[in-house]
Amino acid sequence: MTEPHPRGTAAVSEQAVRRIAGRAATEAHPDGTVRVTGSAAAVHGRRTEIALDVALPYPEPLAPLVRRIQDQVTARTAELTGLDVSRVRIGVTTLTPASATASGPVPSGPSPAPADASSPGSRPPRRWWAQRRLPMGILTLLATVAFGLLAADLILVHTGHRPAAAWRTGTLHWLYGHGPGEPLVTVAGISCALLGACLLLLAVTPGRRNLLTTASPAPGTDLAIDRSAVAALLRDAATGTDGVTGTRTRVRRRRATVRADLTSGDRTTAQRRITRAADQVLTDCGLRRPLRLRVTARHRRGRGAVPAPASALAPASAPVENPAPAPASSATLATPPTHALVGGDL
């Protein structure tokens, strides 16, 4: 008896790969606090590439968790689809605070050190390059339509013995009758040159300006963290400092700015503490290109502050003759509280 030959083939769609990869990423954390915010997959024969944007719990070391997610996605996708997962890209877009009951105790030991950036095969890229899918898709679509129409007309002319299409002959007659010095031809040439310059600019610039690359714990793994997540970490670190009531943070590609409002305490000491906390946050992030940190602290003026007495605003050289004794009640009201003098304009 002969063995039956296999009948047909099975194809796994990109949508199915995206869903399987997203579900596998949520299974990487024991508490299920990993949330997928975006996904993409490309299937080429028996190979697939996956890209996921995830929201991770805070506080937790990013590099080991991202590596765990990548291993889980690779193993589960290959097991369920039968495809060879050639690459998995993980982008951290959000850090969500997790409660003690949901995330468990935070490990007290030191976090694993990132891989040495100078070792071969583990040096992370300076910037995360965008694939420029939208401009390339539009350009490819326009080129396909234009050359497809031209090829169809040539085939009909040579095989079907039909006259050339009116749009092709009309275009040739118009180009023959208009020289390069005419305004319309000049405008069209300038437009084409500007379009080419824009395409060259997109080709040589990395894009994805909102992502900052970090050191990778293993070769072949690219990690990036969103700038808004770094700003949230800096804001939490500054707010946890004594005397700070409000903070404003801003993170750019090469610089981070922290502005803190104080209600009490010495401004220089508070600014030094905020700087230490912010430096520790940036060190823990392990950014490929360290950010220049700028910290500014100022005392916040209270809304209900009692104004200072007029005698305090008068110059010292002006003597006061025969000061009239004030009743005890009015003197008590005129004495400003201590917190109203902190950070004032006196």
Image (spheres, grey):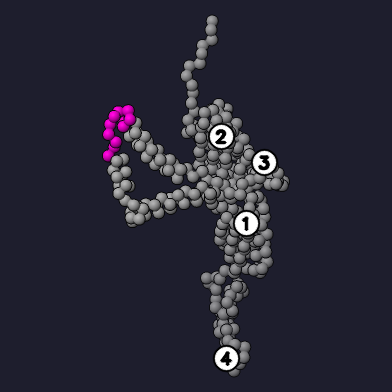
Residue at numbered disc 1: 291
Q: Secondary structure at mark 1?
A: loop
Residue range (magenta)? 156-167
Residue at mark 1 to residue at mark 3: CA–CA distance: 24 Å
The percent coordinates of residue 62 (x first, y second) are 63, 45
Of residues 148 and 293, the one nearer the viewer is: 148
Indicate the amino acid at tag 1.
Leu
Counting residues from the start of the chain, the first of labels 3 and 2 encountered is 2
Query: Residue 12: image x %, image y %?
Result: 49, 28
Instruction: Please give the residue where the numbered disc 4 appears in the rendered image.
Output: 324
Question: Please, is residue 337 above or below residue 203 in the view?
Answer: below
Find disc 3 in the rendering and name its residue.
Answer: 121
Mark 4 or mark 3: whose residue is earlier in sequence: 3
Position of residue 79 relative to residue 180, above or below, is above
Query: Looking at the image, is mark 4 or mark 1 earlier in the sequence?
Result: 1
Q: Mark 1 or mark 3, which is nearer to you? A: 3
Q: Secondary structure at mark 3?
A: loop
Residue position marked by numbered label 2 in the rendering: 24
Q: Check whether the beta carbons of the residues at disc 4 and disc 3 lie within 8 A of each other.
A: no
Give the camera-side residue of 2 and 39: 2
Q: Residue at x 57, y 27 (%)?
A: 79
Amino acid type of disc 4? Ala
Helix, strand or loop status at disc 4: loop
Tell me if residue 312 comes above or below residue 146 in the rendering.
Answer: below
Residue depth check, mark 3 versus mark 2: number of the one nearer the observer = 3
